[in-house]
Amino acid sequence: MKQLFNRLISFFNTIESKIAFYPTLLAFFGFNFAFLMLFLEKKGISRTLIEKIPQLLVEDGDTALTIISACIGGLISMMVFSFSMVMLLLSQASSNFSPRLLPGLISDKVHQIILGIYLATILYSIFILFAIEPSGDKYDLPGIAILLSIIFTIVCICAFIFFIHNISQSIQINNILENIFILAKGRILKLIDAEHDKGELPDFEDTEDWYEYNIKESGYFQNIAMNNLLDHCEENDNRLHILPVKGIFVLNNIPAFKSKNELTDEEADDIRANFNFSRGELIADNYALAFKQITEIIVKAMSPGINDPGTALNAIDYLTELFALRMRKRDETIITKDETPLVKLNTIDLEELLYQVMASIRTYCKQDITVVQKLFLMFEYLKIQPTPHKDYDEVINKEALTLLEDSQRAIVNERDVAHLNKLAEKFKS
């Protein structure tokens, strides 16, 4: 039962990022609320309000039909326009910045909830419309249900105004970078806090000779039901080593995990069932994606078609702060229970992360002196950051000197080259 509950939680976290999740949920609520109101109308809920505040209720069936029909038509038009605006946003973000931004924009809960409010109100109004009799007197009309339909329509109009404001903000690159940074920062700080709570990193056994098991599906390794794995290790006196790095695309039949004890086919399948895969990536599950997205924004901004070094410089500022946070995190992740190390996770270390980011930036930005100078300032800032790893200084020096080597080949102005050599002096020791 516990394993089933943990899997349901993981499944919910997966589908929550889908663009149809909140609209479907709210539409279901609107559908059921309409039948609830019709049930209450049969119990005479409107009669009391008609007698006390008749001004709030529509007293003519034809008028009620006209109002509700107009509300439904207007809401459908607003919903179509809103969906068109979302598609325009996604198209612009893909062409101007990076296609990798699309999953994050699609999973924006504000847009999903507003679209869900539209759908819920439309469904509610349609079913209330069926209950209106044109020739009925005021006591036969579902007065409160009609009033609520009008109120919900007004709420939709307010939501539409907010939607226009929010979507106009969402397309601005500064806000996109800010949102990426906030999500990644929250994820990294959560991991750092978890490491601090556990104290010193315990030693984990050498897994070289452990039994290896392959995965049986492909997709982006998004998440894992860790509680189930800990329960398995505790109940069977076992240890596990998870091989894929979270966020990478896992291919079918590659090694997925190692087990200290030999497992039956059924036990191996139970462990595989705790791996969650998807066809998209989200920063909330994988902070390394934020580095990848910001890097692609920098590269796209420096392309000849865009030619926007200002955006590249702003993106490097966010990249600098994220790297400073990442330097406070350990390179290894070991999950313990009651101070006993049970599961080891492979994670991307800082050296590999910094290299992958700088490899792309060096390729496309090495000829721009302003961007290169900004990168050297980033390295200078990172060297003074507190870190649990003493060898991070050497990693930073290596990347700085590699950047210097590429820039010297691309930049021909002697004054610029002399300035770069001066900036690189402190990384040569």
Image: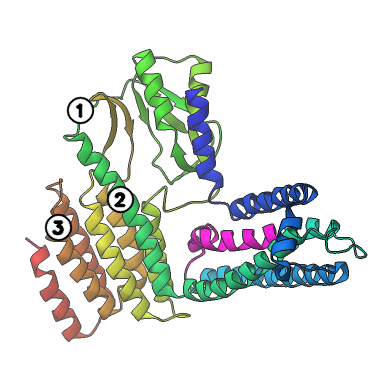
Q: Quadrant of the C terminus?
A: bottom left
Q: Earlier in the sequence, mark 1 or mark 3?
A: 1
Looking at the image, is 272 positioned above or below residue 56?
A: above
Q: Amino acid at mark 3?
A: Gln
Residue 381 placement, left or right of 317: left
Q: Earlier in the sequence, mark 1 or mark 2?
A: 2
Question: How far across and down, in percent of the image, does residue 324 sit?
Answer: 22, 58
Q: Amino acid at mark 1?
A: Asp
Residue 220 placement, left or right of 152: left
**Mark 1 crowdedness (10 Å alpha carbons): few <14, some 14-19, many ≥20:** few
Furthest residue toward front = 51
Q: Main secondary structure of the magenta part?
A: helix
Q: Amino acid at mark 2?
A: Ile
Q: Nearer the viewer, residue 330 or 84?
A: 84
Looking at the image, is 27 positioned above or below residue 149?
A: above
Rounded to the nearest angstrom, the CA distance separating label 1 from label 2 is: 23 Å
Rounded to the nearest angstrom, the CA distance separating label 3 from label 2 is: 16 Å
Q: Where residue 385 is drawn, which disc sits there?
A: 3
Residue 293 placement, left or right of 26: left
Label 1: which residue? 203
Magenta residues span 97-122
Q: Is residue 284 magenta?
A: no
Q: Where residue 219 is drawn, which disc sits there?
A: none
